Structures are given as C-alpha cells and as structure tokens.
Image (tube, rainbow, N blue to C red):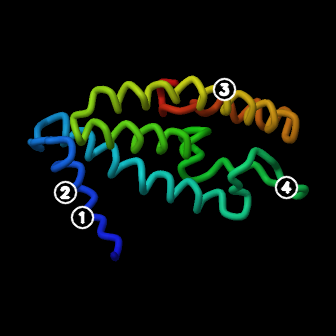
Amino acid sequence: MDYCAACDGMDFVQLQGMIYRFNIMSAFGLCLFLIGIPMRRVAKRTLGKYYTYGLKTLEKHELVKHGIYKHVRHPIYLAMLLYNDGIPLFFSSLYGFLLMQAFIPLILYRIKIEENMLIKKFGDEYREYMEETKKLIPFIY
C-alpha cells in the first residue's frame, strides 16, 4: 500500500474522533508553523558550511553575525520552538502543547553548552556578539 499523507490526517480524525474546527488558536498555531519553517531554512542557509547537527566548530570556523544572526544568536532553536508549538496549537491539543513546553529547558541547556563552546573558540569576539544580540527573542531575550 502506498503512503498517503492526507490519509494520515483522516486516520487522526477517524481514530481519535476529532472534529476539527479552525479557530483563532488554530490560526495562531498555523502562523507559528509558517514562520518557524522558513526561519529555520534561512538560518541554516546563512550558516552555510558551518551548520552541523552536532555541537562542533570547524578548524577555520568564522563567527556568523550577519543576516538573521544579526538579530538573534540562535534562530534555529527559535524556529524549532515556533513550529513545534504551532503544530499542537493548530490541532487545539493542550496535551501536545504542554509536551512541547517540556523541551524548552532542554533547548536552553543545549544553548548554554553551545555558547560555552563558542566562547572557547572565539573568545571576546563572541562575548561582544552576545552583548549586541539577544539569545532567542529579538529585542527581548
């Protein structure tokens, strides 16, 4: 049997008896998702060859401070928080939303490890960058 993404949605509705109603919360979730996905793509593209899934720096690594990184130090994590929260909000799933919130401390811990690694690699250049930009939310945090 061939895979059908639309059929998965039907299974969700049929198996769980969900009656889907698009409301303000769903619209907000959709907006978060639609902002998060391209933000992640832009951030990864801006990093280019310096993007890795693991936490590491390259031998001839340069600190990226342009593009989206001019406004926030960790836009990929921000994007992940946005689209991961957007999905359960779109489906009006309180439990799903609460589950996604459990990942926030883990992401903040990973950011701490990453920033220590970048301070070790770039020293004062990264410390100055930290003073000039916010960690996750532009102008706020």
Vertical placement of residue 64 versus 6, above or below: above
Q: Quadrant of residue 58?
A: bottom right
| Inter-mark Cα distance, 1 to 4 | 41 Å
* Badge 3 amino acid: Tyr
Percent position (x, y) of residue 89? Answer: 27, 36
Give the mark nearest the N terminus, 3 or 2. 2
CB atoms at circles 4 and 3 under 8 Å apart? no
Q: Which mark is residue 58?
A: 4
Outermost residue on the right side: it is 59
Q: Which mark is residue 10?
A: 2
Residue 122 or 10: which is nearer the viewer? 10
Using the rendered view, name the quadrant where residue 128 is placed: top right
Label 4 to label 2: alpha-carbon separation: 45 Å
The residue carrying mark 3 is: 109
| Quarter occupied by the N terminus | bottom left
Relative image position of residue 130 (x, y in whole percent): 68, 30
